[in-house]
Image: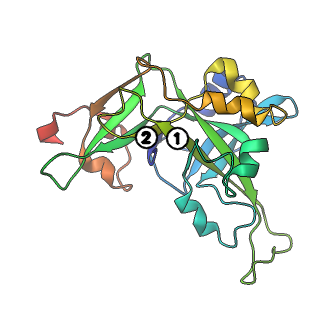
Amino acid sequence: MCGRFVSTQTTDDLAQYFSAEVPEQALEENFNVAPTQPVYAVRAAAGNRSIASLRWGLVPFWAKDIKVGSRMINARSETAPDKPAFRRAFTKRRCLIPADGFYEWQKIEGQKQKQPFFIHRADEEPLVFAGLWERWMPKDEDGQGIPDATPIDTCTILTTAANETMAPVHDRMPVFIPPTMWDDWLDPETDPARMRDLMVPAPEGLLTMYPITTAVNSVRNNGAELLAPVRRDES
C-alpha cells in the first residue's frame, strides 16, 4: 500500500516534467503527505495535460459523506476495475500522481514499533503513481446534493503486489506508469482492458530504500530531516 509520501516539486518543475499546464493553486512542499491532504495530480484536459490539486482519498460520486475518502487512499489494481467505488473512475478518470518517494513500515520481529523506510527511484527521478480521480458533490443529511455547492475532486493511488525489492518491507507497492504510457493512461477513450496490463510490480532496479527516523510516524513532523538515513538502532 501507500499511506504517506513526499511531494516537494514546484509547479514549474511539474509543468516542465509532464509538459502540462501550470496549476492555478500551488501547494507547499510536503515531506509527510497524509490522507485527506491536497496532492498534485496530472489529468487529461482537452487533448493536453493539466495539473490540479486533489484531495487524497477517493470519494465515490454516490457517497453521502466525504469522510469515506479516508478509507480509500489506495485501490487494489486487481479489483479496482470492477469494484463499485472505483469502477467508473478506472474507466474514464485516470490520473498520474507525482512524488519524490514514499514511506513504508517494516515489521520487526520481537518489537511492537515498526521500522519506517524511505523508498524512491534509484536515479532520483520523480515517481509517477497510477491514480484514479472522482468528482463529489457535497450532500445534505438526506444524501441529496446541496444546491450551488462547490464540487470536490478526490483521488486514490493504485497498488499491486510487491516486487523483490519491496517484499522484505511490505507485500504491496504502488503502481507506476512509465512516460511512454502517460497519454494512454490519461486518455478516457483508451480501452480500460489495455490499462490492466500496466498494473504490475515495478521492474527490479527502479527503486532503492533506506531506514529513516520514526519521527515520520507523526504527521505533525514535516521537514527534510525525515529523509535522513539512520541505522536501525538509531531510528
- Horizontal side of 228 relative to 161 (left or right) equals left
- Horizontal side of 223 relative to 153 (left or right) equals left
* Of the pair 125 and 110, the residue shown nearer to us: 110
Quadrant containing the N terminus is top left
Q: Amino acid at mark 1?
A: Thr
Disc 2 secondary structure class: strand
Q: Kindly identify which residue carries mark 2.
A: 172
Q: Could you tell me if residue 26 is visible in this image?
A: no
Asked if the residue at tag 2 contacts the one at tag 1, i.e. Cβ–Cβ closer than 8 Å, the answer is yes
Disc 1 secondary structure class: strand
Residue 108: % across, % down = 19, 45
* Of the pair 141 and 24, the residue shown nearer to us: 141
Instruction: Please say if 35 is above or below 104.
Output: below
Instruction: Please say if 94 is above or below 84.
Output: above
Q: Residue at x 59, y 32 (%)?
A: 199
Q: Residue at x 53, y 61 (%)?
A: 71
Q: Kindly identify which residue carries mark 1.
A: 159
Quadrant containing the C terminus is top left
- Count of number-bearing discs: 2
Q: Residue at x 65, y 40 (%)?
A: 41
